[in-house]
Amino acid sequence: MGGQGLKLGTVPFLNAVPLTLALENRAEVELRAEPPARLLPLLEEGGVDAALVSSFAMFHLPGARYVPGVGIASRGRVKSIRLFCRKPPGELCRVGLDAWSLSAANMARVIISRKWGAAPEFVSIDPRRPPREDKSLDAFLLIGDNALREEAGGLDLIDLGGVWTEFTGLPFLYAVWLFRPRAGDAGACRLLREAKEEGVRRLDEIIARAARELPYIDEATARDYLTNCIRYDVGADEEEGLRRYYAYLAEDGLAPGGWEADRARMEE
């Protein structure tokens, strides 16, 4: 890292803790938590050197590079990417999308169109105030801890991680460590991979802390979520899922053309 400090952005969600716990209180690291949709502007403005951003964000930042081998992914159910529905998926006419979300919101657009054949109007919603009583919405999407804390309350819950894998046969890669152009080096890349390895070793500690501090999750639920749903190792299947996601977005006009995973991968 050239002896200089590293400014990192992360998200205020439980699923990020295994990737950031080992970075807390390190003198050479400045860690800043923001909603996912805010991290891309921070990278673009140079407010951080790297951020744990939505995979969707890196398609929109030319020259940015992601750290291979580490991220937030799922193969099948994920629990924290949920569509709350009052109508069958194929009949959706108006859908609220979590304003904090980039990857999951656009995954929802892809799934609703390509799997269910619907073409609803999409509107932004504040995830801190879920619009359960807004009868003009046929469904609303929540992500992260906001999805974990929201109860079904008579609505149908659809886990979009499960739907994506059913539809494609692939994992979904929600977030990666992304360095802005000309930032980062092999040392920074190694630091983030080692932090992931330490965080995974400390999962019991993270789970116990979550059960103690978060009123909407107990230890069994936290353990299932962080060990059976969320995956932190990014391999060939996760990268293939990422490429499939990008191809759908580009075809649907939701991402610019020309992005290539090989060119965007950071050299170690």
Image (tube, grey):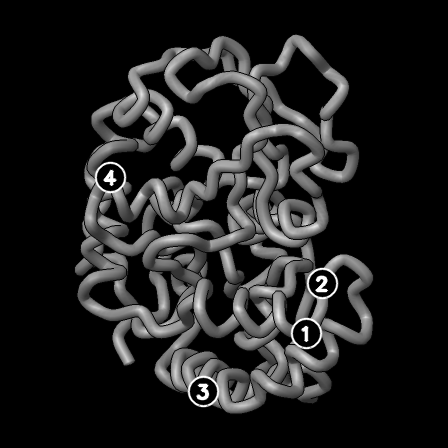
Mark closer to the chain start, 3 or 1 = 3
Q: Which residue is identified by label 3?
A: 197
Label 2 vs label 1: CA separation? 7 Å
Label 3 with label 4: CB-CB less than 8 Å: no
Instruction: Tell me the element at label 4.
Output: helix
Q: Which residue is identified by label 2?
A: 217
In percent of width and height, residue 167 lies at: 24, 39
User: Which amino acid type corresponds to the residue marked 1 in the rendered image?
Assistant: Glu
| Residue at left offset 54%, top offset 36% | 157
Mark closer to the chain start, 3 or 4 = 4
Label 3 vs label 4: CA separation? 30 Å
Quarter-of-image position of residue 57: top left
Mark 1, residues whose alpha carbon is within 10 Å: few (<14), some, or many (≥20)?
A: some
| Residue 90 in sight here | yes
In percent of width and height, residue 139 lies at: 56, 22
Q: In this image, 235 relative to 123: left or right?
A: left
**Labelled disc at residue 167:** 4
| Residue at left offset 34%, top offset 43% | 59
Q: Which residue is identified by label 1?
A: 219
Quarter-of-image position of residue 168: top left
| Residue at left offset 57%, top offset 89% | 202
